[in-house]
Amino acid sequence: MRNFTSSVITAISDVNDNNEVTIEFNGKPYTYTVSDVEGWKNDLNNVIEEDESVGGFVNQALRANVLQLA
């Protein structure tokens, strides 16, 4: 995944063949199933390009059930 700056999220993996992504919160990894892979990738790239809050974006995706714990 691309480089970004976040106070809480330390890393985001690429989505794997099982539509799963691993997100590290302060170094602790959590794996999520992505319900809309293309939308997730496009939206995340836009957030990073616009230097918006990656943590806010992930939080919003969790609330909208785009990301669900695997």
Image (spheres, rainbow, N blue to C red):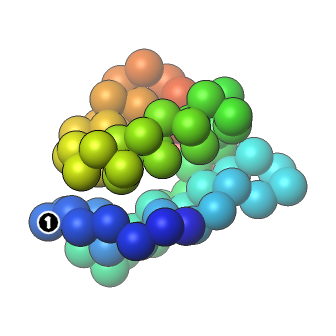
Q: Is residue 31 visible?
A: yes
Q: Is residue 15 left or right of residue 53?
A: right
| Tag 1 secondary structure | loop
> Which residue is most to the top?
64
Closer to the camera in the image, 13 or 25: 13
Q: Residues within 10 Å of mark 1 (few under 14, many from 20)?
A: few
Height in image: 46 above or below 3? above
Q: Residue 33, image x and y in percent?
A: 64, 43
Closer to the camera in the image, 5 or 58: 5
Height in image: 61 above or below 53? above
For residue 46, which quarter of the picture? top left
Q: In which quadrant is the N terminus drawn?
A: bottom right
Dot 1 corresponds to which residue?
7
For residue 25, which quarter of the picture? bottom left
Residue at the location (36% across, 50% down)? 49
Q: Residue 13, image x and y in percent?
A: 57, 67
Q: Is residue 55 visible?
A: no
Q: Residue 60, image x and y in percent?
A: 32, 29
> Which residue is most to the bottom?
27
Q: Is residue 28 left or right of residue 14?
A: left
Amino acid identity at mark 1? Ser
Height in image: 19 above or below 7? above
Residue at the location (32% across, 66% down)? 4
Residue at the location (14% across, 66% down)? 7
